[in-house]
């Protein structure tokens, strides 16, 4: 396997701006993404080119550090895209894109991921395992994110 792709969406009973603000607050990632143990380093301000480092620790697998770099941050269209790579220097990477759109009296959040596996170990072992994990992790994270944003929304 050289690459794999995924997509997940959720409806949230909160304003699109509130949803986008939570998604782009990288310091709060561990609150709603159970696979993220901690934010190790984060930028002073989130902008294109900014990087942050997290400690990933999905259940039943060893932890690792991951570095993400913002490729797009459009606060008007509620679009956020970044490229993630393992901190160990492996050239494999994942491109993530988040979009938030108004939907009724709330928002619809869609996240896509495109994973590019550049080394033998990632193609044969890591990639297939991570593909299965993300198929479970991302929908669970979206549900937790929706709960978190509703809990912090005024009113």
Image (tube, rainbow, N blue to C red):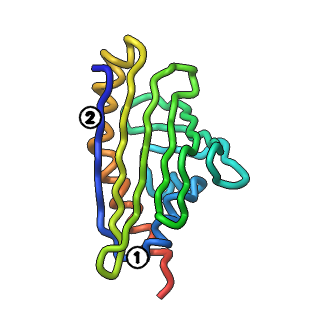
Expressed as whole percent of the image width and height from the top left, the position of residue 15 reads: 43, 77
Picture quadrant where residue 143 is located: bottom left
Q: Secondary structure at mark 2?
A: helix
**Please, is residue 150 above or below residue 137 in the view?**
below
Q: Secondary structure at mark 1?
A: loop
Q: Read off the residue under disc 1.
A: 14
Q: Residue furthest bottom?
A: 155
**Please, is residue 124 above or below residue 33 in the view?**
above
**Please, is residue 99 above or below residue 7 in the view?**
below
Q: Residues within 10 Å of mark 1 (few under 14, many from 20)?
A: many
* Residue at left offset 47%, top offset 88%: 155
Q: Residue furthest top?
A: 120
**Please, is residue 102 above or below residue 125 in the view?**
below
Expressed as whole percent of the image width and height from the top left, the position of residue 104 reads: 29, 79
Picture quadrant where residue 32 is located: bottom left
Is there CB contact under 8 Å for labels 2 and 1? Answer: no
| Left or right of residue 89: residue 43 | right
Give the alpha-carbon distance from disc 2 to disc 1, as whole Å: 30 Å
Q: Read off the residue under disc 2.
A: 132
Expressed as whole percent of the image width and height from the top left, the position of residue 98 reads: 42, 54
Please tell me which residue lies in front, 104 or 32: 104
Q: Residues within 10 Å of mark 2 (few under 14, many from 20)?
A: few
Q: Residue furthest right?
A: 44
* Residue at left offset 39%, top offset 27%: 116
């Amino acid at each position: 396997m050289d690459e794999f792709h995924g997509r997940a969406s959720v409806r949230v009973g909160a304003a699109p701006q509130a949803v986008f603000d939570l998604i782009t607050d990288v310091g709060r990632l561990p609150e709603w993404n159970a696979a993220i143990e901690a934010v190790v380093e984060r930028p002073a301000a989130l902008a294109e080119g900014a990087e942050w480092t997290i400690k990933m620790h999905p259940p039943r697998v060893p932890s690792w550090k991951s570095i993400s770099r913002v490729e797009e941050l459009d606060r008007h269209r509620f679009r956020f895209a970044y490229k993630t790579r393992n901190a160990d220097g492996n050239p494999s990477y994942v491109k993530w894109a988040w979009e938030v759109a108004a939907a009724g009296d709330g928002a619809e959040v869609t996240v896509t991921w495109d994973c590019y596996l550049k080394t033998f170990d990632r193609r044969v072992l890591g990639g297939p395992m991570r593909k299965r994990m993300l198929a479970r992790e991302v929908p669970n994270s979206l549900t937790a994110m929706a709960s978190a944003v509703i809990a912090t929304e005024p009113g």
